[in-house]
Structures are given as C-alpha cells and as structure tokens.
Amino acid sequence: MLRDVVHRTDPELAALLDLEDQRQRDKLRLIPSENYTSQAVLQTLSSALSNKYSEGYPGKRYYEGQQYIDAIEQLCIARAKSLFGAEHANVQPYSGSPANLAVYLAFCKPGDVIMGLGLPAGGHLTHGWNVSITGKYFTSVAYGVRKETGRVDLNEVEALAKKHTPKILFCGGTAVPRTIDFAGFAQIARSVGAVLVADIAHIAGLVAGGAHPSPVGHAEVITTTTHKTLRGPRGGMILCNANHAQALDRAVFPGLQGGPHNATVAALAVALKEAQSEDFRRYAHQIVRNSRALAEALLARGYDLVSGGTDNHLILIDLSNKEIPGKRAAQALDRAGIETNYNSVPFDPRKPFDPSGLRIGTPGMTSRGMTESEMPQVAAWIDRAIAAEKRGDAQQLSTIAAEVRELLLRFPAPGL
Ligand SMILES: *Cc1c(COP(=O)(O)O)cnc(C)c1O
C-alpha cells in the first residue's frame, strides 16, 4: 500500500523499486554482507521518525519534541546492551565506517599509530588502509595472515604491536572466514597499552545468536554495522565498557555527526528485539551449518578456499586453480542468477579491481529458510556456471538462472 502511493507520486522511481524487489526475490543472494530484513524493520524505517531532529542523547537534546524519540532511543540502547551483555551502547552511528571513525576520534590524535588487519588479508578499509581517511590521518601498521594457513598469526600481531605500540588495535574484518580469537587479541592489546576494538560488522548476528564467541569482556570497544548478519536496518553501533562511554558518545555527537537517523534507530530497536528470539538463535546457527556444508561441497568440486574452509557465514574462494578471474566469474554467476562479489585473496597477484577471489556467504539464503540440504545444489550451480562461462555458453547461464528462480519459489524472501 505504501508502494501504491509512490507509484502515484513518482511512477518512474516506483517502477525501479518494484524491479529491485523482484531481483531480490529471484536471485540467490550470496554476498556475505547482505541479508533480508523483516517487514517490521522495513515498515519502521519508512515511519514519520524521518521527520524529526534530535541532536544529542536521550534527556539531553538540543531540540524540543523528544517525548517519543527519547523513549525509542532508550529502548534501542537497552536492547543492544542486553542482547550483547555490554555496559554501554551508542546506537547513533550512521553506518559501520562512521562508527569506526568515532573510535579514532575518541582515542587518537592525527598521526598516532593504529593497527589493523590489512585490506588484502581481509581487513576493512577503516582499519587503517591507505586510501581511507584512517590510513591518511593516522600512522597505520597492518598485520596480515599466514600464507600457508590463510589465518591471522597472533605471534605476528604481538611482535608488530610490541614494536609499534599502537593506540588502538582493531580485530575483525570483512573477508575473514574464521573465528576471531578475541581473548588472544586482548592479551596483546593489554601488554602494549592499546585499546582493543573488535569490529564485528560481519558477525554481529552470529555473536548475538551464540554462533560465534563474543568479544564482550575482551574488547573494550566493539563496533558493528547493523545490517549484515544482525539483519537490521543499514546503520552502525558502538558497544563499550562504561569507562569509555563518555568519550565515545562525545565522539559520535558532536564530534562526528549531527542529528541521529531516528527511523533507523527505531528499526534497529525492532531488529534487536527479533534478535532476542529463539528463531534468531536457530537462524544464526543455521548460517554456520549452511556455510560449512557449502564449503564442503565446493571443496569436493576442487575449489580452493582461503584457510581451507569456514567457521562462520563467509567463504573466500581462490579461483586461481580454476583459471578464471574473480570478476569474470562473479559477472557470469550474476547472469546465472547467483549474486556474489569478487574479492582479493591474501597475497593476490592480481589487482583489487580484478582480483583472483570470490567472496560468498550464507546469511541471505538462511534468512529465506534454506538449509544444508540445498547447499550441494548451490555448489553445483556455481561450478556449472563457471564452467559455462569458460566455454562461452551463455545459454547454460540462463538455464541455471531459471533453475535458481524455480528453487527460490519454495523459499519466500522475508520482507518483500
Ligand atoms: C561492512 C564493514 C564496515 C563498514 O560498514 P559500512 O556500513 O559499509 O560503512 C566496517 N567494518 C567491517 C569489518 C565491515 O565488514
């Protein structure tokens, strides 16, 4: 019904919205940072809260008329704290990158040393990579992964931390298929007087659902997006120990941002309530089971997986032995109705815009209700599509896309 109104006001734009809905229904969406939010979250996002300014925090605003906005933000904060067991939560960051920037602002001066997982090894741009403001305004030291294992080596992290004594140490990343050893990182951070920041953007839903160890109690600061495995609206969030609450709140506002996006905060409150449910716990564990099953099926077809497999929602395929670059594979898969993203692999000899890898994950499929039983079929489609692309068989890609659509009819997309 809301869409009918858009159709009357702006048919051109409404038609594009409809097409995107259809695309999200018809595609097997394997991008590990994406998901399907619930209808309740989508409805809340389109509420009148979008009309309201509320710079400041509950009880201390610079605008009047906050009777309900304060209650909404407090509800969101309370749910975030209880879901993750954190002492303090700031739910105002506009997204994951601003959440990380606020952490820099709270703890560092320009030029200070910071440490994070390098982008080519699976880290995020905002962990100090050179093209990011975080690599330009701070002195960034990157740790990597071991070539033989594809995994972070805490001995390397410790040696670098001792040598460079960073102010903040980031753990976590954006293409990390393995469990993060928060306790191990915490020990290193403590030994050099660094603040440990766990960026759980990708795995927040797994942590909330008990399918990945929690950084709470190890990392003094936790940043996350809210729209990946957590399955909320697009946004960011910071959790921290009480002693850092004031510095981080001030860094978010007035340090970095203006008025919070209240509709997003409200939609996050809804998502956090959903995340407390038994259903969500099942979803989180199913994500990992699906990911393991998909990894096994790909290994059986001769695919080379970074680190040899997965512990979480994400699989990073190194396509070097398949003699097809990641970008060409991703484009062919998209034509076959399978949405992925091309990605660098550790020690990639190819350029980031045309790398050797393919990054896939199971959150979207799992939200649609798929289980281990479907994963061999998914691996088979990926394999068939890549083989078809290599021999230039466009017809086969269309055939696969039709098969994908057919299977997805049995797994309705939430929210759409
Ligand atoms: C996605 C991601 C971010 C950034 O989130 P945006 O909302 O895109 O700004 C930060 N850190 C990690 C590890 C991520 O995966």
Image: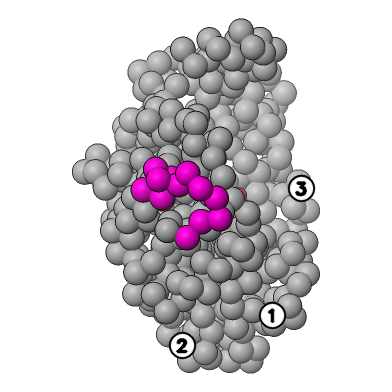
Q: Earlier in the sequence, mark 2 or mark 3?
A: 2
Is 333 located above or below residue 222 in the figure?
Answer: above
Q: Residue at x 30, y 44 (%)?
A: 273
SS for dot 2:
helix
Can you tell which quarter of the image residue 146 is in?
A: bottom right
The residue where tag 2 is placed is: 190
Who is closer to the viewer here, 386 or 13?
13
Query: Three-letter amino acid code at disc 1?
Result: Lys
Query: Three-letter amino acid code at disc 2?
Result: Arg
Mark 1 CB within 8 Å of ligand 1 = no
The residue where tag 1 is placed is: 109
Q: Which mark is residue 353?
A: 3
Who is closer to the viewer here, 83 or 245?
245
Q: Residues within 10 Å of mark 2 (few under 14, many from 20)?
A: few
Query: Three-letter amino acid code at disc 3?
Result: Phe
Q: Residue at x 65, y 88 (%)?
A: 164
Is 259 located above or below residue 333 in the figure?
Answer: below
In this rendering, the label closer to the viewer, 2 or 3: 2
Residue 335 position in % (x across, y down): 64, 23
Q: Earlier in the sequence, mark 1 or mark 2?
A: 1
Q: Which residues are magenta?
A: 60-71
- Quarter the C terminus occupies: top left
* 156 on left or right of 134: left
